[in-house]
Image (cartoon, helix red, strand yellow):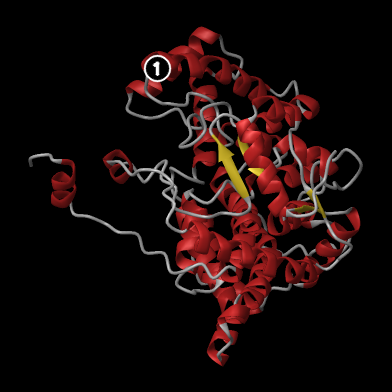
Amino acid sequence: MAFFRSVAALSKLRSRVGQQPSLANSVRWLQTPSSSNTDLYSEMKELVPEYQERVKKLKKDHGSVELGKITADMVLGGMRGMTALVWLGSAVDPDEGIRFRGMTIPDCQKALPGAFPGGEPLPEAILWLLLTGKIPSKEQVDSLAQELRSRAKIPEYAYKAIDALPVSAHPMTQFSTGVMALQVESEFTKAYERGIHKSKYWEPTYEDSLNLIARLPGIAAYIYRRIYKDGKIIPLDDSLDYGANYAHMLGFDDPETLEFMRLYISIHSDHEGGNVSSHTAHLVASSLSDPYLAFAAALNGLAGPLHGLANQEVLRWIRNIVKEFGTPNISTEQLSDYIYKTLNSGQVVPGYGHGVLRNTDPRYTCQREFALKHLPNDPLFQLVSKIKEVVPPILTKLGKVKNPWPNVDAHSGVLLNYYGLTEENYYTVLFGVARSIGVGPQLIWDRALGMPLERPKSVTLEKLEKLVGASS
């Protein structure tokens, strides 16, 4: 594996790779090694001046360079395809899917430390990678895991805020409420009120982001046990990593379940900056709202059926198939008929299609590989596999979507169900915990790089018609 001394060098190499297909095929990924710092904050202190200089140079030397054109379709179509945002942690290629700081999911599985040799990447390793752009050592990951555990204590009033809601409230409503309650202790808000210099904004944002990330599993686990179990809090285990502790506090301690939770959190952590939850967090934070306020807003976006709520819709749809036929062991013809029935009723096939991707989501693929390894004979997994064979040809034939392939949501529910987490209404909370590991680092970098208040220009419908030369 080749390594480079700086992210700037890596960026130059990537531009050359994009121009040389043969090199792109021979070099899958290249990444900067971490320094000897075991403290993530110290690592950031070294990186911030370098990144600030890069942004300063971009503005000075290339600020007037055009990045593309804007069409009426983009304005009317949710701004899809419009380059309008810098997001450091990840990028989504339409054909190959997500790359975390240039690394594909298989790259991460090979290079990032796991709980044991050959294990899935630890969420702490993903967090370090997304924030610094560097591959952490096991020592650095262990140090970060301990730091997160030390920050994980939840104030009593946060539990009381959740308890003020009826138990019947949707888990995401309770989750957003819990995050808002934590905002009382925002270090950024305190520092801003004291008059902190804007060049230092990133430092209390770092504190807030890590505190928030650390406390979310405890808040989320409390909501799960309040709604579905006996309401008793299972305390954090100081010997466990972030993903394993979350599963433990939910009430699951089987080693295989802990390993799946590590994978789940890692692959759901980030998906560039244009999706609803990530963009919402960036937008709200651009007003200098603190990370708690920004992430609570992100959770409310994640709760929508077209975003994070989709994972629960997939499992419900699969269960309806089983209910319809009385068994998951159905023929291809029966499944095809059911899919047409779904589409003809005006519904979509949940878990298929994506706003950016034009191939099978690699997050789906890695979950499938996990299932093939650990639960190949599970009837619902076999049904999911059959659905993947049947749905894309039908969607392609009907021409209903640009991408007929499965996304991350098409698989996660069946795996969670297999390991005993059967309450699909809760699934978006899991997604929310994971998404903090992608959003948190970006909020820190937004403040470090002095990203301004986001304020795009809107037009009236009449103005748009005039711009395109249309008559009303």
Q: Nearer the viewer, residue 229 or 395?
A: 395
- Name the element at disc 1: helix
Residue 33 placement, left or right of 25: right
Outermost residue on the bottom side: it is: 194
Mark 1, Cα crowd under 10 Å, few <14 / some 14-19 / many 20+, is some
Q: Is residue 188 above or below residue 20?
A: below
Q: Nearer the viewer, residue 449 or 19?
A: 19
Q: Quadrant of the C terminus?
A: top left
Residue 77 drawn at (x, y percent): 32, 41
Q: Quadrant of the N terminus?
A: top right
Question: Which residue is found at the position 63% from the left and 66% from the top?
Answer: 53
Residue 75 drawn at (x, y percent): 30, 46
Residue 374 placement, left or right of 386: right
Is residue 368 visible in the rendered structure shown here? no
Is residue 200 visible in the rendered structure shown here? yes
Across the whole image, how many numbered discs are drawn on residues?
1
Residue bearing mark 1: 340
Q: Nearer the viewer, residue 161 or 364?
A: 364
Q: Nearer the viewer, residue 225 or 458?
A: 458
Q: Is residue 424 above or below residue 143?
A: above
Q: Picture quarter containing residue 230?
A: bottom right
Residue 89 drawn at (x, y percent): 63, 52
Question: Which residue is found at the position 54% from the left and 56% from the top?
Answer: 171
Residue 220 placement, left or right of 403: right
Q: Picture quarter containing residue 438?
A: bottom right
Say what amino acid the circle numbered 1 marks.
Tyr
Q: Is residue 268 above or below residue 382?
A: below
Residue 424 drawn at (x, y percent): 57, 43
Question: Which residue is found at the position 40% from the left and 17% from the top?
Answer: 340
Outermost residue on the front side: it is: 61
Q: Picture quarter containing residue 331?
A: top right
